[in-house]
Image (cartoon, helix red, strand yellow):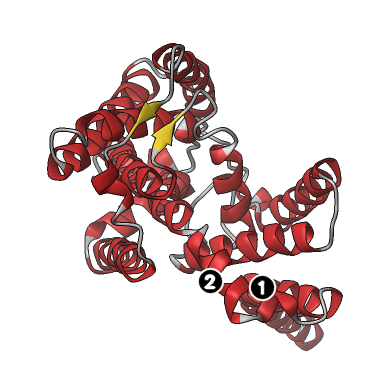
Amino acid sequence: MTTTKEAAATAEKKGFDFSAIRNFLPLIGFVVIVAFFAITTHGLILTPKNITLILSGGYMLMIAACGVWLIMTMGCLDFSQGSMLGVSCAAVCALSHISIPLAIVGGIVVGALIGAVNAYFHVNRQIQSFVVTICMMFLLRGVCAFITTEAPVMADTSVLQLNSMSLLMGITIAVLIVTYLVTRFTKVGHNLKAIGANERAARFAGIKVQKTKVLVYVIAGAITGFAAFVNAIKVGSVTSTAGNMFETQLLIAMVLGGMPINGGARARFSNIVIGVLSYLVLQKGLVMMGLTTEIQQLVMGVVFVAMVALFSERSANQVIK
């Protein structure tokens, strides 16, 4: 009897240790990635110039990742983020000729409306989120190509004048802080994790699952619409390829940050920051090593599959909703 108890205690202890270690794996992975590229690039990746370049390419990704994190915490996915960014950015560029505040509002509204359409088909029509958002991705890609057929949609020159590191860094940090405070000190974070862990149980617990899902998709769309304004500041125009592969970048960044692909209780706000920074360093490091685009994509794919396998909650038998 004593032996059985000791074995159970040992197993429990081992399980706890593994869980504790797994929580730190994304941070450990980030340190390993930085160290690896610091060695392979002979320290060039850690120069102030390259650090600035890495950060400057991450503002839009970091902002949009906040909305994607909310969606993934519920156990859902959104593959329309890239196309949504392109269409929202087109609205921002067009409205910027009238006024910058109107351009910001226009981008947010367009993103929120697209998010609402995604929510309608997923929540009301009971179609899985990845099916709905993949269809929306192709639809919006066509819209983006149509509105840029004759020429790119150009932003007003006043938008480009806002391209300062201090301003963009401040905007990004503000979005991160608001997201953290809302999900940490309100019921939102708990409700999203409960829905991701077990939607039926969350409904029995009194959580308004459908209303929450709709709200999150709209908010995530609005956040991406705001990220489109940041994209307009950086790029100044929209072409048919605007936002291309952006949803893939977001997904890879999330899993690099330790985000379970099926959401739930293990979702952490740190998934956003660590994941995006890891992706940016990995992307910049592969470029500095002189690898071809095909090899870079291969490396990203291998890393993505490995991280999904590591952080998915297979024991909970969860599926993507």
Please report the residue visible at 52 percent of the width from the left and 57 percent of the height from the top: 57
User: For the N terminus, which image quadrant?
Assistant: bottom right
**Residue at position x 76%, y 88% from top?**
2
Judge by depth and name the residue closer to the eye, 96 or 70. Answer: 96
Please tell me whether residue 123 is drawn above or below residue 313 in the rendered image.
above
* Residue closer to the observer: 135 or 72: 135
Residue type at numbered disc 1: Phe
Look at mark 2 in the image and give the residue it sits on: 52
* Mark 2 or 1, nearer chain start: 1
Q: What's under tag 2, amino acid-wise? A: Thr
In percent of width and height, residue 291 lies at 85, 53
Eye-nearest disc, 2 or 1:
2
Quote the CA–CA distance across marks 2 and 1. 18 Å
Q: Quadrant of residue 112?
A: top left
Estimate the x, y position of residue 198 in percent, counting from the top left.
Answer: 45, 44
Which secondary structure, mark 1?
A: helix
Residue 218 % position (x, y)? 27, 36
Task: Give above or below for 265 relative to 1.
Answer: above
The tag on residue 30 is 1
> Up-down: is 42 above or below 219?
below
